Image (cartoon, helix red, strand yellow):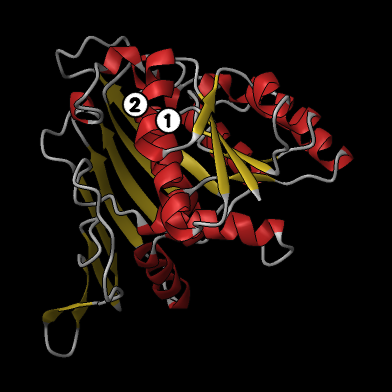
Amino acid sequence: MNILIVGLGSMGQRRLRLIQKNYPNISIFGIEFSEKRRKEVSEAYNIKCYDSLLNVLAETNVDAAFICTPPATHHTVIKELLENNINVFTELNLINTGYNELCELAAQHNLHIFMSSTLLYRKEIQKICEIVHSEKLPLQYMYHVGQYLPDWHPWESYKKYFVGDNETNGCREIFAIQLPWILKCFGRSVSVGYTSKKKISSLDITYPDSYLVTLEHESGNRGVMIIDVVSRKAISSLEIVGEKLHLFWDGTPSGLKKYNIETKSLESIELYDSFEHNLNYSSNIIEDAYLAEIVCFFDLLSGVGSPLYSFNDDIQTLKLIDKIEGKV
């Protein structure tokens, strides 16, 4: 199988590393507009890199492509790939431009469009959902996710990639990462209650850098989300409270804990024998879920299984984020 990775920044290289390590028989090609980065990636990973899809297809056939370019470019890139009969795995889009058009185009060509939602593939999230769904009484949750924007990519300025733009800003990305599993876990039918957004930092951005939002789920569950790009220590702090359940998670592989009502003590929920962590990222980001998504995508291409997230799911998520941001 020939795989193309479009966009060879940090996420493109992550997908590249994982595929090379776990699927050594797959041939990988890259597309990158930066000549300097094309050369660096070509030498580091021993793959052939191009500056356009046209030049790739002039030399080889491509079975599937991973879209790792800035979110605002995704619609154009996905459309071009589908028109050339190439299956697509796309990272977060953040903008639902042309979703209906792309889905219709994929159906016409009998192709797959796989929508990334990495946290749904985390073992801790899957366990949390399992526990929550087993509860009979309503629950409430408090969830704070934040990281100082300049620390996201320490090797480059936050003003030089998509999180610096209003349309695809850093808070919007955090919401897009987190809300899919929140909706799956606590209830997809949800209404936005109190929303407070504010810029509290000196960051050179023109969008709010912190949000406080209350969500009321039709299931009876409710929650408070605090999302920011200001937290100097990267934080992912979840607490779920109910009469018969008290659950904690700090975002790390070993950080899921349940309060034992009988013994009145916290008990760890162990889910990993081992896991892979890239030291370039904070401790709550591990490679395992990124690999699980890749495995699911390749299984889908082989006619096995189904993805955990779809374009239709993402439409709901992005509409909710628009409401939180005050766009609708």
For badge 2, the amino acid type reads Gly
For badge 1, the amino acid type reads Ser
Residue 200, above or below 181: above
Which image quadrant for residue 9?
A: top left
- Relative horizontal placement of residue 172, taking residue 25 as reference (left or right): left
- Relative horizontal placement of residue 208, taking residue 38 as reference (left or right): left
Residue 207, above or below 285: above
Which residue in the structure is indicated by mark 2? 170
Which image quadrant for residue 16?
A: top left
Quarter of the figure that contains the C terminus: top right
Task: Residue at 73% x, 24% y: name it.
Answer: 58
Residue 61 at x, y = what percent? 73, 37
Q: 10 Å neighbourhood of mark 2: few (<14), some, or many (≥20)?
A: many
Which image quadrant for residue 243?
A: bottom left
The circle drawn on residue 42 is 1
Task: Residue at 55% x, 42% y: name it.
Answer: 28
